[in-house]
Image (cartoon, rainbow, N blue to C red):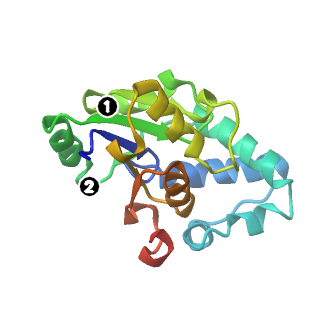
Amino acid sequence: MKIKLVISDLDQTILDTLNRFFRVFNKTLNFYCSMQVDWKTFLEKYKKDKLDNIVSSIAPLDKFWDKFLEIYDDESFTYDKVIDGVKEALSQLKNEGLKIIVVTGRKSRKERVWENLRYHRLDVYIDDVYTVLDVDNQEFRFSKKEIILKVLNDYGYKREEAVFVGDYRYDMLSGKKAGVLTIGVLTGHEDRKTLF
């Protein structure tokens, strides 16, 4: 069956938001204690998916990451950057007639995500946006499975007509559990082995 729908993660897949993530991570640490981490330590832990090792000693993980997402949504996106090649790829997909939906694990209003996309002039390529607020529950904190299934249901596409693109190990797991073709990109600092 032909692919008709591209569902893409946002952070580190379409936009390089790592600098914002770093700033917000430190602001969240500061909310719970006066601790901060330097860029080198942050990046090392981020790449190995070990930030929880820092967090677990100062706050319950769920509370920390909920606070992180709250702060993240309000943080300026003016320093975010479009990942190289993304505009060209989105343009080509649109020219081929595919529908493109952006999904994110952010606890954001849709309009806030649209503001971010407009600022970076990506809105012209995107048909819709879904956030974690669009689903009633998640299988686990980083799961996008429910969002992917909601997109398929809302737009009436079959699983075999869709592809999901993401940068993180849990993106890969989410796409596979949703039953769609899943493509990993290396822009999120995960290694190839982890994504495949």
Let me know if residue 115 appears in the view: no
Query: How dense is the environment of label 1, judged by Cα within 10 Å: few (below 14), some, or many (20 and up)?
Result: some
Q: Position of residue 13 (x, y in %)?
A: 40, 52
State left or right for residue 3 relative to residue 155.
Answer: left
Residue 116 percent across, percent down from the top left: 42, 32
Image spot of residue 96 (x, y percent): 14, 39
Residue 126 is tagged as: 1
- Which part of the image, by quadrant, shows the C terminus? bottom left
Q: Disc 2 marks which residue?
A: 84
| Residue at (57% x, 46% y) in the render | 145
Q: CA distance from mark 2 to mark 1?
A: 17 Å
Q: 114 or 21, which lies in front?
A: 114
Q: Are marks 2 and 1 in contact (CB under 8 Å)?
A: no
User: On the image, which quarter does residue 37 sit in?
Assistant: bottom right
Q: Residue at x 39, y 66 (%)?
A: 186
Identify the amino acid type marked 1. Ile
Q: Kindly identify the residue that appears in the image at 54 percent across and 64 percent down.
A: 169
Q: Position of residue 16 (x, y in %)?
A: 41, 52
Q: Residues within 10 Å of mark 2 (few under 14, many from 20)?
A: few
Q: Amino acid at mark 2?
A: Asp
Position of residue 66 relative to residue 55, above or below, is above
Residue 195 shown left or right of residue 33 in the figure? left
Mark toward the start of the polypeptide (2 vs 1): 2
